[in-house]
Structure formats: C-alpha cells, structure tokens
Amino acid sequence: MKAPHQRQVVTDIYDEIKPIKYKGYEIPHQFTATFYLMDNDNVEVTKENFKTFKTWQVKFYIRVTKAETVEVVKTEILGASTYKGHDMFSKKPVDPFAYGTVQARHYVALRDYRARFVSIAVQVALQSHKFTKKADGSFEVTIGDKIEIPETELSRINFEVTENAYAKLDDAFYLYVAEIYNREILEGNPRPNLVLMQTLNKELKTVQGYTKVCRVKKYILEAKEKGKASPAKEPPTKKEKGKSNGKTRKK
C-alpha cells in the first residue's frame, strides 16, 4: 500500500501544560496528534485532482516519559468526510456519525505506517509548542509558534522514534531507508550506504541487506557510475574452413 497523503497534522496539549525533556528538546508530557489524510485509495494524487478526495482521520493520544520513551495510549480513526480544515478552539464534541464508514484500507494504512505516524507526531509537537515558565512554577505555551530544529536533528529524532516503534521490518521501514538513500543519491553522494550506517547505527552488511530489499521493492534510485565503461563482448570471429580453434580438423 502506498504511503497516505497528508493534508495536515495537528498536535494539541492534553490536560496539564507540562513540558518534558525529549532528545535535548522540550515536548508536551501528554498530547494528541491528529492526521488529516486523503482518502485516495491508492489513486495517484495530482494538483488537478487533490481537491476531489475526501479526508479521513487518525488521532493518537501520546504520552512521553522521563525515560524519553514515546507511548501511544489510545488511537482513534474517523471515516472520510469533506475536508474543511480543523478547529483551533472548540469544545463541541465530535459527532462520529457525521463521518463516513471506516474502510479496511484505513486499518491497513494505520498498521503499515503506524511508526511513521508516531515519528511525525513527535516532530510536529517538538516544533509547535514553545513553553515559558511563570513565576509560580507553572508553564504557559505559545500556540502556533514554529520552533526551528535542524534537519539533521529531526532525522536523528525520526530514527530514534521509529527504531523503538517498529515491531518488525515492515514496508514503512523500507520506505524510510529508501528515503534516506534516494536523498543522498540526488545530492550526488556515491556512497549512500555510509550515511545509512551512521543514521541507523548498523553494520555495512546489515545496511546492504536493507537496500537489497528496497531494490526488490523498486523503492530506491541507483547511483550512476562515472568513468567506467560498460563491459561489451567482442563479436565471434568466423572460423576458417576445415579448422576449429586453430587446429586442423581430422577427416
């Protein structure tokens, strides 16, 4: 199944405004992450047709611990509906019967891309909530702020979240490997496996095993070898009559 197309990802603090340290940054102790996903059913999304698709939702309730682990304590799915954005402030309860039926493909997407969803949720939460400590020891948070985090740091956080979230080497994991590999190829790096070794903290043999699977799945681009001619076989020469391999044929 192709990776779901995201319209928007929104994170909100749940209950108490309380930051906790995570990988060197501050993140809400408890928060929700709502993914608004196009219900395109594996149809290619283009600039011409993206408005025609309805939107289904996945909502995660996430807790971050002092041990810097990310725990999903609850997950909700809502069927497809016409996308109208999201309410920043609303106490109106969600009416689940205002949405379409949850399809089997929605459960498949959640199963296959759960780790990726959780990783994105963490990255959005880190970049969207700026905490300020008040005189009484409590905290206030600025909504809508954009906290700049270097791409290298986000990549590291992405790996650490997904490394703990993956129960198996599933399709989402190989898409993640391919994403790093393809980025290095497009940037002209002839040895993308070295970057994968550093990012995944794995030996070369293990990384080569991952990329081998990615090739079979046709997820990765191939590096072009420079200055190396393709091997070519010389055409066979005609043999002289009555001779074979330089020896006279016996009658």
Image: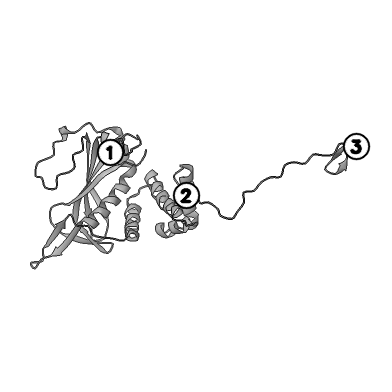
Counting every numbered tag in the picture gives 3
Quarter of the figure with the N terminus: top left
Question: In front here: 129 or 103?
Answer: 129
Determine crowd level at label 2: few under 14, some 14-19, many 20+ residues with C-alpha closer than 10 A: many
Labels 1 and 3: the sequence-earlier one: 1
Quarter of the figure with the C terminus: top right
Quarter of the image for residue 114 reads top left
Element marked by disc 1 = strand
Element marked by disc 3 = loop
**Label 2 sits on what residue type?**
Thr
**Label 1 sits on what residue type?**
Met
Indicate which disc residue 211 carries: 2
Distance between mark 1 and mark 3 Cα atoms: 78 Å
User: Is 19 rendered above or below residue 9?
Assistant: below
Indicate which disc residue 38 carries: 1
Q: Residue at x 50, y 55 (%)?
A: 205
Residue 243 lies, in percent from the top left, at: 86, 39
Residue 34 lies, in percent from the top left, at: 22, 45
Quarter of the image for residue 226 reads bottom right
Specify whether 88 is left or right of 121.
Answer: left
Which residue, as the protein is rendered here, is positioned at the far right? 251
Residue 64 can be seen in this image: no
Which residue, as the protein is rendered here, is positioned at the far front? 48
Q: Are marks 1 and 2 in contact (CB under 8 Å)?
A: no
Distance between mark 3 and mark 2 Cα atoms: 56 Å
Labels 1 and 2: the sequence-earlier one: 1
Which residue, as the protein is rendered here, is positioned at the far top? 101
Distance between mark 1 and mark 2 Cα atoms: 29 Å
Q: Residue at x 47, y 57 (%)?
A: 189
Labels 3 and 2: the sequence-earlier one: 2
Residue 34 can be seen in this image: yes
Indicate which disc residue 250 carries: 3
